[in-house]
Amino acid sequence: MQRYKLILAYDGTLFHGFQKQPNQRTIQGVIEDALLKMTKGKHVIVHGSGRTDAGVHAKGQVIHFDYPGNVIPAKNMLLALNALMPRDIIFLDSELVNDDFHVQYSTKAKWYRYIINQSRFTDPFRRNYTGHCPYKLDMLKMKKAATYLLGKHDFTSFAASGGQIVDKVRTIFYINLEQNGDEIVLDVIGDGFLYNMVRIITGLLIDIGHGQKDVEDVEKIILAKDRQKARNTAPASGLYLYHVFYDDLPKKYNLIAKRD
C-alpha cells in the first residue's frame, strides 16, 4: 500500500461538488471510479483538502489516497489518471508521500480566489467562471473593509447554515482585491474556511462597494456572530480553490506577520 498526493484542477460547472454523493456527478466519485478500473475492482478512498461545492472550481485542489498493489511511479500515476479523466478534470502533479501525511490535516493554509465580473450584461462565455455584478463598486471602500477581516476571529456571521463545524474561529492571513479590466479579483488566504465563508465575505464586500453597507459594519458583523448580519452570498461560479499550502506560509502572503 502506497500513499499518493496529487494536485488537480477542475471546472466545477457540471459537478455536484467534490464530495461523493449517490446518483450525482462529483469530483471524488469520478476519481474513485477511475481508480476502481486501475485496481481491477478494489475500492480506493480519495481524500480531498477541501470539499468544494457545486459549481465551484479549483486550480490547486489536493488529494491523497492509498493505492493497493505494486508501487506505481508518481509520474506514471499522473499519466494513468489523466488518461481516465473527463475533459473538465486534469491532474497537474503527483508524488509519493509518507503514511503520516494527510491532505486535510497536514494543511498549513488555503488560498481561495473569487472573480467578480463587472460587465454591464452577463457574459455568456464567463457566466460559469465569474460572479456577475453590473454595479459600479468603490474599490477603496472594499479594500479598507477587507482589512477588518485580517487576523483571528470568530466567523460565525460568515458561515452558512448546514455546516457541521462547531468551532467557528479562523485566522485570515492575507486578503487582497485587484481590478483587472472589467473584473475584480479577491484573494483570501486563511488557516481554514467555514461553509460558504469566502462567498459570504465576497457578498459583504460587494454590498460595501455598492454603498449598501458601511466599511465600519464589518467589525460590527464579526462581533455580532449572527449569520443574518451578512446575508448576501456570492454565486458559486466565481469561486476557485486556488492553492493549498503544506509548508510554512511565505511571508509575502502573511499580512498579519507584516503588521505585527
Image (cartoon, rainbow, N blue to C red):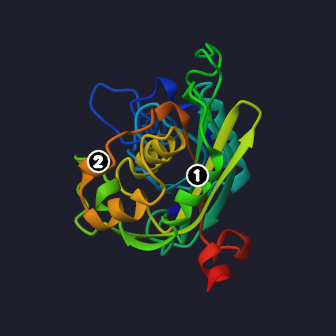
Depth check: give the residue in front, 16 or 80.
16
Is residue 163 visible to the viewer in this orientation of the structure?
no
In the image, what residue type sits under mark 2?
Answer: Ala
Q: Which residue is mark 1?
A: 141
Classify the position of the C terminus by image quarter: bottom right
Q: Label 1 is placed on what type of residue?
A: Lys
Q: Residue at x 40, y 46 (%)?
A: 200
User: What is the crowding at mark 1: few (fewer than 14 residues within 10 Å), some, or many (at least 20)?
Assistant: some
In this view, 55 is above or below 49:
above
Q: Is residue 137 left or right of residue 191?
A: right
Determine the residue positioned at 64% across, 81% down. 259
Q: Taking 133 as reference, is 28 above or below it?
A: below
Q: CA distance from mark 2 to mark 1?
A: 25 Å
Q: Is residue 104 left or right of residue 187?
A: left
Relative image position of residue 148 (x, y in whole percent): 49, 66
Q: Position of residue 63 (x, y in %)?
A: 52, 53
Q: Residue at x 57, y 21 (%)?
A: 127
**Disc 1, SS:** helix
User: Which of these two is toward me, 82 or 248?
Assistant: 248
**Residue 160, labelled with which disc?**
2
Residue 51 numbered mark, or none: none
- The percent coordinates of residue 253 (x first, y second) are 67, 68
